[in-house]
Image (cartoon, helix red, strand yellow):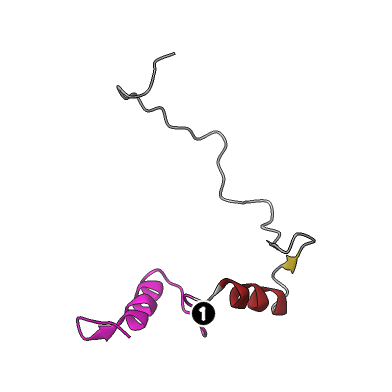
């Protein structure tokens, strides 16, 4: 494990989570895709659909805000 300032990157990651008020009992970090999918399915957090992709129900709030937009004026972008 990479050592930074005397602490491993995993220890730093856990410290950051704790600072945000997240206190996990177990952390799965940097796993290969197939392992993450297997864990999600085992925990009944998602299912593998007919195309082989993991499908999850995020509920009513998905984090997407369709009314939010940003207008960027740049010389490389043609003006309408």
Residue at x 63%, y 51% (from the top left corner)? 61
Tell me if residue 11 is in the magenta stretch: yes
Which span is picked out in magenta? 1-30
Circle 1 sits on which residue?
Answer: 28
Instruction: Identify which residue, 68 or 54, lies in the foreground.
Output: 54
Tell me if residue 14 is in the magenta stretch: yes
Instruction: Identify which residue, 23 or 27, lies in the foreground.
Output: 27
* Residue count near mark 1 (Cα–Cα under 10 Å), binned few <14, some 14–19, many ≥20: few
Q: Position of residue 5 (x, y in %)?
A: 19, 81
Q: State the image quarter where residue 66 is shown.
A: top right
Residue at x 37%, y 81% (from the top left corner)? 10
Q: Secondary structure at mark 1?
A: loop
Farthest left residue in view = 5
Q: State the image quarter where residue 43 is shown.
A: bottom right
Q: Is any part of residue 55 visible from this angle?
A: no
Q: Position of residue 28 (x, y in %)?
A: 51, 79
Q: Quadrant of the C terminus?
A: top left
Residue at x 32%, y 25% (from the top left corner)? 74
């Amino acid at each position: 494990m990479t050592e930074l300032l005397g602490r491993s990157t995993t220890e730093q990651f856990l410290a950051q989570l704790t600072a945000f008020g997240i206190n996990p009992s177990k952390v799965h970090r940097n796993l290969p895709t197939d392992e993450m999918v297997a864990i999600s399915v085992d925990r009944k957090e998602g299912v593998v659909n007919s195309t082989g992709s993991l499908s999850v129900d995020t509920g009513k709030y998905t984090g997407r805000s369709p009314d939010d937009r940003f207008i960027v004026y740049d010389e490389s972008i043609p003006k309408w």
